[in-house]
Amino acid sequence: MRFLLLYATQQGQAKAIAEEICEKAAAHGFSADLHCLSEREKYNLRTETAPLVIVVSTTGTGEPPDTARRFVKQIQDQTLPGDWFAHLRYGLLGLGDSEYTYFCNGGKIIDRRLQELGARRFYDTGHADDCVGLELVVEPWIDGLWAALRKQLVSSPGAEEMSDGLHVAAPPTSLGMDPGGAESPRLESRLQLLHLDEPRGEDLRISARNAANTGQAAALITDSGPSLTCSVPPLSQAALNIPTLSPEYLQVHLQESPSQEGSHMPVTSAGPVFQVPISKAIQMTRDDAVKTTLLLELDISETDFSYEPGDTFDVLCPNSSSEVQHLLRRLQLADQGGHRVFLALMADTKKKGAALPPHIPEGRSLRFLLTWCLEIRAIPKKVLLRALAEHASLGPERRRLQELSSRQGSADYNRFLRDAGAGLLDVLLAFPSCHPPLGLLLEHLPRLQPRAYSCASSSLCHPGKLHFLFNIVEFGGDAPAVAQRRGVCTGWLAALAEPLLQPDAPASRTDSRKAPAPQISISPRVTQPFQLPSDPSVPLVMVGPGTGLAPFIGFLQHREKLQEQHPDRHLGATWLFFGCRHKDRDYLFREELRRFQKLGVLTHLKVSFSRDAPEAQEGDTPPAKYVQDNLRRHGPQVARVLLQESGHLYLCGDAKNMAKDVNDALVEIISREAGIEHLEAMKTLAALREEKRYLQDVWS
């Protein structure tokens, strides 16, 4: 019994889940025809008669992933009739992160449009939340899929001969699934439902007796509670539901190279890549600030790279060379780091649709692959932990890896891996008896993703230059098994910029020749609508605490130049709501913002300091602590800009807390100033987003 299985992925999650469904299908008597949504030549929904299953992630601020953009553009053609897909029966699993305002919106866009074109669900839509663990919805959704597929295939025309005497239970409906009707948004800041459910179903069971035997030694190691390597009852004594072991499919050949590898240029970018020098580096914060913020200037004058204020671009960064070397030593491959890697598919693999990973180029050195191509810092997925358990020689370590991959161990998985930011190297160091083959890791490690940054300049003001801003990310240390480290990209950029921050370094005294500027690789991103309105008379409200200020510096520089070039042109009012911890430590661009105010380019500047002691003020009004406090304080003016003057509001910064709090504040302001109910205010804000007048550039 065949069904069509399509996925759209940005970072590999949706693809991995689709492959899991494909592998499980055979055990349930099905055959899955697996393709990426972008591979339009391999499937045809207009003539498809089999059930359709779609797994789709969400990227950016609620957009479908890049691999789904062409598909979404085609189905959003408004000339298509309402019965265009009337023959289709489908089930959709959406992946998202509730830290972002528009949760699972990539899947919802496709789901809604398929319904509008006549397609009907044979199975409830699932919305999985990466914030709390995708598996909480993914696993029960997959468990219920088989009964729903069987029921759909049995009830299909021409399938009567298969249905003789067969009784199929209805598929499960839960809070994690949409039963097919129109969504009824609850009164909350996200403007959509957050769906969760208790996990159900069974893949492979580890008996309680086996748990007691293999987990006993591990339980004795600690008397202070669980850790990455040790569990406590009841988990240490529980029967486990663990993922099905994924078939291995890569055969690896390491070939000694007689010559040194040449170019270290990254090779995994889909778009054009530009090598550009760092021409300037400035530390924007004091040394005693909680976070260190750097501004880098790139010289793009010798390239075709161009940008507009508000654009984002990718930085192609490598993994830490010390971490790569440490991983090679742990894999006992330190002497083979320079060997070239050649991959082939195992002739006897049982993996359906096995293919060579497209992000692993042939003939490059193992060190190059671990440095430029593979995300070795990625939190290992449960299916990888399950596979690693097979290569642990000590029983307690094998049991613990099984626990961490199990449904029963989800809380420990979240605590000791997800929340701690543990990567592959952390796991291998914590479980010294585990010795996985290289091929297994190449099968499971995802592609090293480029890191996105906002342009913090205007090319009108800085021709041939590109500025961007970032905090040096530091994490780890709190978890005993996870080493203190810097972010993959920000740590690398900070190291490159350090000589530029120290012009009087000893090397400059011993060598009169100027050292070559460090170079990085950048690539333009697909254009997002986070740009200035074409009409400069439109008023703007900009909300950007911390490094979220970056694109607005570009906005203001751009408007400054427009004012110089067209002194008689009317420019709309500009409001900037900025926030930081301390006025004297991390107030970014303070002098430049004052200059913009003096020139009249910035009409209103409202700054809040969250960690400074409140200053004495007239009256009883306490100072604003966060940007949302200042928004509420100036609610009448903000509402007038948005509701009466057709202004635009831009929000940039942290998605986890700030974006939600600002969203709540805006709903509150609209409700109060327009005199409407909370739900109507939410709809008004959603309408502003649809009109591209409420734009977000947020990250977690």
Image: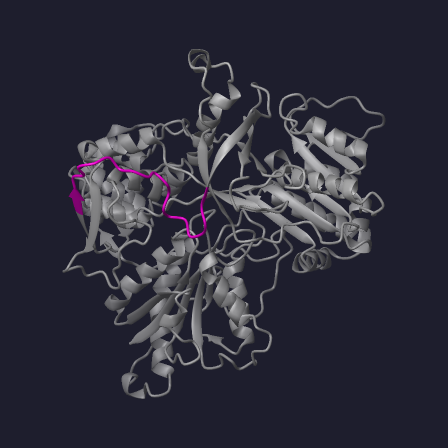
Left or right of residue 629, residue 488 in this image:
left
Q: Is residue 449 above or below residue 223?
A: below
| Residue 690 within the segment the image draws in magenta | no
**Residue range corresponding to the magenta coloring:** 253-274
Residue beneath the point at 25% across and 45% down:
441
Q: Specify the quadrant of the image occupied by residue 460.
A: top right
Q: Is residue 673 visible?
A: yes
Residue beneath the point at 57% across and 73% down:
77
Q: Which quarter of the image is occupied by the N terminus?
A: bottom left
Residue beneath the point at 41% across and 49% down:
269
Q: Is residue 461 above or below residue 646?
A: above
**For this rendering, which residue is in front, 197 or 68?**
68
Q: Is residue 122 visible?
A: no
Q: Is residue 285 above or below residue 169?
A: above
Magenta stretch: dominant secondary structure: loop
| Position in image of residue 297 (x %, y %) | 56, 33
Q: Specify the quadrant of the image occupied by residue 92.
A: bottom left
The chosen color scheme is one colour
Residue beneath the point at 24% across and 55% down:
246
| Residue 267 within the segment the image draws in magenta | yes
**For this rendering, which residue is in front, 582 or 536?**
536
| Position in image of residue 568 (x %, y %) | 85, 45
| Position in image of residue 570 (x %, y %) | 83, 47
